[in-house]
């Protein structure tokens, strides 16, 4: 395919990815209003967020496996269709139960988009040329990440629109993506073959992962880390995943082919993706809260303040992708990205309530530059080193572990934040001779505009110190990611696309069969 044909085909993919990212970020600043309007509880607030993330993370491997068996274009359009249905249901919800269900449907669709967009890219673009196009996807990721909370805040604050448009706004983009994919994406027809879908393995994987993700999401908030709920969820999750490994090792068409982990590159990039998810998502998800509580900024301003990190990610992913495509050398950018990400997290561990925005911008830009060089190129390294028939499985496994790392990081670091904030506020209140509240500020985020000056200063300081501690805890994960990528062996980037390699592999297999028959 020419560059023009590839860009035309990618237009639908980029619109679809934008939709998936928007679904996860547009409700960030709107949720308090949504929950209040529906008369729901704090636990419902948690589930509106968790439902979409659980469904997306748990179904990514399934979509990846399906892409190795069925028409990728049809699967993409199906995932977009599910996203449209989920978005319409969410926007029309009159109760929190339907809203949570609709978020599950949205999450399943977003899981398909997350896995399939990268699979299709690998199918039509040779690894040697993939870097510069991956950079474009990095730009879409950055724009969707920063635009989502801003758009959500504007929609909620606009009286004639309201929070329901946070869900409706993604529908036109999804419909546009379906139309663009139909018009521009041309993939060779998948040869019909009798396949047996591993429904038991799929169920065991989804159930096991959901049990563990529900545990890390709710532990420390709904129940203690050391409790019977923890024992029940972790025990059930572990047993289900052990059973899944047993089933997957014996079925003809496993959802996650365990053999791909014998590939050193896939195994190491999977571990690195998990660690990047913990460090990057787990650390940065609380920056918006730091901007609003510790620095006293509005939701809209808080969204704008994250621009330096997004700009750093955008520039580094684009530039690194272009250079990789031109030179064919990629490992140095993985190592450099891990080093820079570690430095960025270390710098952010020094912030407090008095840190200037100029200094904060530099620290966030450094983190963004590191993540931009590392995150997308881990996928490139894995895709370059697996047979074409396993592109979907390898790509989805990396996306799955990165999402799971983000979920784990968000939950664990969130519990650390709550505990640290409570301790700092108690200490500050005692020093000032102010009676502390019943929960020490641990159960909810205070409304800063209603607090008297002495109390507000204590709260600002507590959140500043606690947020810095989160980045300090995330830094070792980044250093472990660095150690992991150092051991990845650099191999020349292939100059044929996934579809071309699949045709070559099929031809080789047929020739071998003929030789055997002839003999």
Image (tube, rainbow, N blue to C red):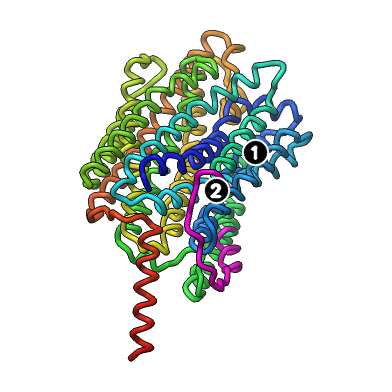
Left or right of 148: which side holds 127?
Answer: left
Would residue 304 be counted in the magenta stretch?
no
Label 2: element kind: helix
On the image, the x and y values in percent for residue 379 come to 37, 49
Quadrant housing residue 197: bottom right
Report crowding for label 1: few under 14, some 14 to 19, many 20 or more residues within 10 A (C-alpha): many
In-front residue for pair 444/176: 176
376 left or right of 294 in image: left
Q: Nearer the viewer, residue 318 or 434?
A: 318
Q: Which residue is mark 1?
A: 48
Extreme residue toward the top, this view? 453
- In this rendered view, identify the residue nearer to me: 94 or 215: 94
How many residues crowd around disc 2 within 10 Å: few (fewer than 14), some, or many (20 or more)? many
Q: Residue 398's mark?
A: none
Residue 222, given in percent of the width and then of the height, sits at 62, 42
Residue 326, placed above or below residue 271: above
Regarding residue 433, the answer to whether it shows in the image is no
* Residue at image mark 2: 111
Q: Is residue 60 above or below residue 41?
A: below
Q: Position of residue 26 (x, y in %)?
A: 58, 30
Segment colored magenta: 183-206
Q: Using the numbered discs, state the Cα–Cα distance from disc 2 to disc 1 in whole angstroms.
A: 16 Å
């Amino acid at each position: 395919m020419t560059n023009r044909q590839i860009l035309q085909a990618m237009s639908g993919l980029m619109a679809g990815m934008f939709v998936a990212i928007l679904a996860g970020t547009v409700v960030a600043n709107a949720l308090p209003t949504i929950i209040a309007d529906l008369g729901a509880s704090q636990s419902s607030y948690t589930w509106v967020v968790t439902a979409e993330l659980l469904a997306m993370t748990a179904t990514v491997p399934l979509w990846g496996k399906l892409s190795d068996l069925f028409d990728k274009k049809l699967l993409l359009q199906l995932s977009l269709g599910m996203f449209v249905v989920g978005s319409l249901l969410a926007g029309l919800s009159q109760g929190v139960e339907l809203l949570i269900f609709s978020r599950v449907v949205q999450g399943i669709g977003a899981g398909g988009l997350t896995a399939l967009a990268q699979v299709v890219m690998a199918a039509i673009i040779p690894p040697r040329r993939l870097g510069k196009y991956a950079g474009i996807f990095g730009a879409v990721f950055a724009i969707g990440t920063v635009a989502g909370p801003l758009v959500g805040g504007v929609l909620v604050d606009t009286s004639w629109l309201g929070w329901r448009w946070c869900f409706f706004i993604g529908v036109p983009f999804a419909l546009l993506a379906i139309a663009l994919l139909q018009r521009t994406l041309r993939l060779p027809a998948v040869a019909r073959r009798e396949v047996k879908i591993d429904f038991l393995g799929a169920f065991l994987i989804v159930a096991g992962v959901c049990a563990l993700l529900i545990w890390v999401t709710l532990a420390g908030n709904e129940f203690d880390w050391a409790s019977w709920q923890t024992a029940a969820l972790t025990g059930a999750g572990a047993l289900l995943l052990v059973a899944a490994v047993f089933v997957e090792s014996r079925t003809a068409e496993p959802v996650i082919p365990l053999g791909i982990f014998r590939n050193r590159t896939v195994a190491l990039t999977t571990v690195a993706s998990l660690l990047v998810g913990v460090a990057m998502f787990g650390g940065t998800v609380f920056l918006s809260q730091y901007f609003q509580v510790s620095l006293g900024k509005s939701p809209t301003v808080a969204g704008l303040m994250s621009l330096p990190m997004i700009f750093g990610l955008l520039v580094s992913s684009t530039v690194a992708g272009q250079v990789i495509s031109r030179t064919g050398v990629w490992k140095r950018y993985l190592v450099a990205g891990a080093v820079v990400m570690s430095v960025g997290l270390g710098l952010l561990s020094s912030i407090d309530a008095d840190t200037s925005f100029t200094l904060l911008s530099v620290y966030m830009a450094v983190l963004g530059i590191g993540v931009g060089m590392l995150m997308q190129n881990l996928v490139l390294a894995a895709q370059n080193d697996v047979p074409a028939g396993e592109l979907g499985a390898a790509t989805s496994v990396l996306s799955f572990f990165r999402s799971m790392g983000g979920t784990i990081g968000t939950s664990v670091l969130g519990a650390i934040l709550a505990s640290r904030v409570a301790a700092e506020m108690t200490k500050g209140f005692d020093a000032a001779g102010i009676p502390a509240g019943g929960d020490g500020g641990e159960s909810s985020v205070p409304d800063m505009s209603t607090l008297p000056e002495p109390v507000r200063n204590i709260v600002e300081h507590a959140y500043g110190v606690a947020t810095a501690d989160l980045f300090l805890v995330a830094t070792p994960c980044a250093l472990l990611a660095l150690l992991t990528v150092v051991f990845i062996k650099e191999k020349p980037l292939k100059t044929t696309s996934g579809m071309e390699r699949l045709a070559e592999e099929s031809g080789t297999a047929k020739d071998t069969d003929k030789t055997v028959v002839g003999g």
